[in-house]
Image (spheres, grey):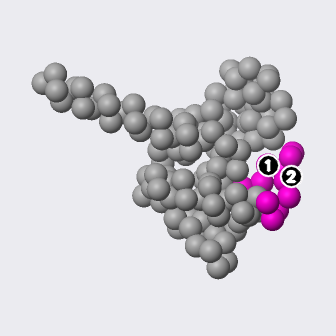
Amino acid sequence: MTAVRFENGKRVIRGWDRVFDALSAEPRRQLVLSLSDRPADEPVSLPETAINPNVPPDPEALRRELYHCHLPMLEDAGYIEWETDPLVARRGSRFDEVAVVLESLQATATEIPDPLVVGCQRLERERQVRSEDPEKNSDGSLTR
């Protein structure tokens, strides 16, 4: 029994490390958010959907970073699948593991300290919607 708990503990730790590594870069967070906003089977165009609208980078530099770093990392973890021509990404088999973290942050936007919200359009919008009517989500639906 102890060996099973130990192995399960190691597996969970590796899973959380993988999720936080995946979400540690802004283009990867933006990509996960973009995919979350679309139907599960619909791909998103890159590099456009991996850009933070407040801090637009050089699209060609971002394209190279996506191709050589961000997309392979997300694909290796099973969070996305991607194609090069055209450059698009879609949800992978383990996408929910990363999406749920960002969804949880959005759901608690009113509780997140200002330095992590101000300047982030999505969290600012969530905070505003929830402070106006705490029973509603940003899409107007009622919370569960």
What's drawn in magenta, residue-wise?
Answer: 49-61
Find the distance from the CA under tag 1 to the CA under tag 2. Answer: 6 Å
Residue under label 1: 52
Q: Are marks 1 and 2 in contact (CB under 8 Å)?
A: yes
Is residue 96 visible from the viewing direction of this image? Answer: yes
Dominant secondary-structure state across the stretch colored magenta: loop
At 62% from the left and 74% from the top, the residue drawn is: 84
**Magenta span contains residue 81:** no
Above or below for 9 versus 28: above
Name the one closer to the observer, 108 or 31.
Answer: 31
In the image, residue 42 lies at what x, y percent? 58, 68
At 73% from the left and 64% from the top, the residue drawn is: 63
Above or below for 125 versus 94: above
Above or below for 13 versus 32: above
Quarter holding residue 59: bottom right
Residue under label 2: 56
Quick one: label 2, few (<14), some, or many (20+) residues within 10 Å?
A: few
Is residue 100 visible from the viewing direction of this image? Answer: no
In the image, residue 28 lies at what x, y percent? 64, 49
Amino acid on which disc 2 is placed: Pro
Total number of numbered discs in the rendering: 2
Name the one closer to the observer, 57 or 45.
Answer: 57
**Magenta span contains residue 54:** yes
* Left or right: 132, with 3 as reference point: right
- Give the SS element for disc 2: loop
In the image, residue 127 lies at what x, y percent? 76, 30
